[in-house]
Image (cartoon, grey):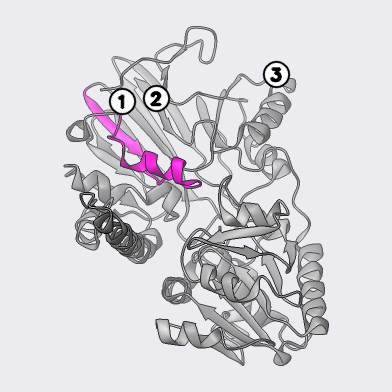
Amino acid sequence: MQLHFLGAAQEVTGSCHLLRVGDAAVLIDCGLIQGSAKDEARNAQPFPFDVRSINAVILTHAHLDHSGRLPLLVKSGYKGPIYAHPATVDLCRIMLRDAAYLNEKETEWTNRKRLRKKLPPLEPLYTRSDATKAMRRFVAVDYGVMQEIVPGLRMRLRDAGHILGSCIVETWLAQAGVERKLVFSGDLGHTGAPILRDPEIIQDADLVVLESTYGNRQHRSWADTETELEQALNSAAQHRGNILIPAFAVGRTQELLYTLARHYAEWNLQRWTVFLDSPMAIEATEVYSRHAELYDSEAVQVRRRQGNPFEFPKLHFSRTPLQSMAINRIESGAIIIAGSGMCDGGRIKHHLKHNVWRENCHVIITGYQARGTPGRALVDGAHALRLWGETIRIAATVHTLGGLSAHADQAGLLAWYRAFRNAPPVALVHGEPAAMNVLHTLLEQSNVKVWSPSPNSVMNLHDLRLLLPGSITSPASLT
């Protein structure tokens, strides 16, 4: 029995872990590497395993840093099932198709430039046809259902509270009389977040693979975050400009719409025209509307009182490119919610180009920004952005609302882990080194055996001395 740490090891994106039990091999996630152009170029590298040897995939949730290489996996010859929650299946049908479309368009744009230089054309990472083929491999599994997916490996999905359909994955491994229970946290939700239930508590494990995205920080309270959002809206109203909100199409957009709907009258939002300028976010919001069975008690009550909890007056869905371009003629009074959440693609880049040089523009950052992305540059106080070969001066006011994060903060991660009765060993993943190291130290101070695996390291799960010297190695090849 082995666990290979293939992605999101000492970084945030590209989640991918490989479990080997006897002759069987199971992937937990198969995500895109996101960030700088150099980082994203790694997505085209061959998988560090024989694709034909993989028997099953378990997907924790639909975000592309967890799901985005699944079409490439299928394109490379994978023919097994992809197990996911039904809501994750619905969201992946939208997100993987959109990611494929962007791959196609970006490659087409690149090839036009290569043609002028008499260079051979490139192929997209994968196409919409590849995404469709990947969706045929999905198998929907509800929370709480125990099933054996390969000989010697059972799994059960639990609610992670991160986005709709997000999962904690419990796995039970058995080989030659040795049994192990591994729990993969996936991305854990922020306790008390709107719409979704809090992450489920699990009490037993032999090893916990724990995300550490915000292992070094505490989020603002939800009340303080809502106050800060209200203040940003009021400040922008005084400056008579537009507000740009780059937002992840799945999760963050729905939280924003839900919050604006709840405070519509109180925050005097009738003075604004709100544009949801993202076809994918519009479709994802429709999925959220259909899966009310996953709401927390407050959202259930809101839905009973008001109907659709994501709708309010003067909200416009901009589906077509022409509708999106028309927004850029508005110089004041618009709240524009658009993807991508890190400003590294999608329609938000166009809105930045048309607005961010204006002193009366406000930009509200509502989520994690990976290193190397335009969103991270905005957060870090950059004076200019490079968009389509043009340098755009930044004069806008930038607000960062950390409390809207869909990830658990340090306190949330520790509280979830401390619910385990036996203080199991921990492998930290899905975090930048600074955040991971702080959480690592805090766990060690509580006498927890903890490891921050390096990329491509392997854990021998037979070894009862888990995480002691010699139990983790870094082989040259995983094939």
The quarter of the picture where residue 367 lies is bottom right
Residue 44 lies in the magenta stretch? yes
Residue at point 50% right, 31% down? 9
State if disc 3 and disc 1 touch (CB < 8 Å).
Answer: no
Q: Residue 268 carries which label?
A: none
Local crowd size for mark 2, using a 10 Å CA cut-off: few (<14), some (14–19), many (≥20): many
Task: Identify the image quadrant of residue 461.
Answer: top left
**N-term mark: 3 or 2:** 2
Percent from the top left, x then y, of residue 115? 24, 57
- Residue type, numbered disc 1: Arg
Contact, mark 1 vs mark 2 (Cβ under 8 Å): yes
Q: Name the residue under label 2.
A: 3
Q: What element carries label 3?
A: loop
Q: Quadrant of the N terminus?
A: top left
Q: Give percent across and percent down for residue 368.
A: 61, 52
Helix, strand or loop for disc 1: strand
Pinpoint residue 403: horizontal percent, then vertical percent. Answer: 72, 58
The disc at residue 447 is 3
The disc, 1 or 2, on the residue closer to the chain's N-terminal end is: 2
* 322 or 403: nearer the viewer: 322
Q: Quadrant of the C terminus?
A: top left
Q: Mark 1 points at which residue?
A: 20
Extreme residue toward the top, this view: 470
SS of the residue at dot 2?
Answer: strand
Q: Which span of residues is magenta-colored?
A: 23-48
3 vs 2, front mark: 2
User: Total label count?
Assistant: 3
- In the rendered image of this protein, does residue 469 appear above or below residue 254? above
277 relative position to 77: left or right: right
* Crowd class of label 3 (few under 14; some 14 to 19; many from 20; radius 10 Å): few
Nearest the viewer among 90 and 110 is 110
Q: Residue at left 66%, top 59%?
A: 384
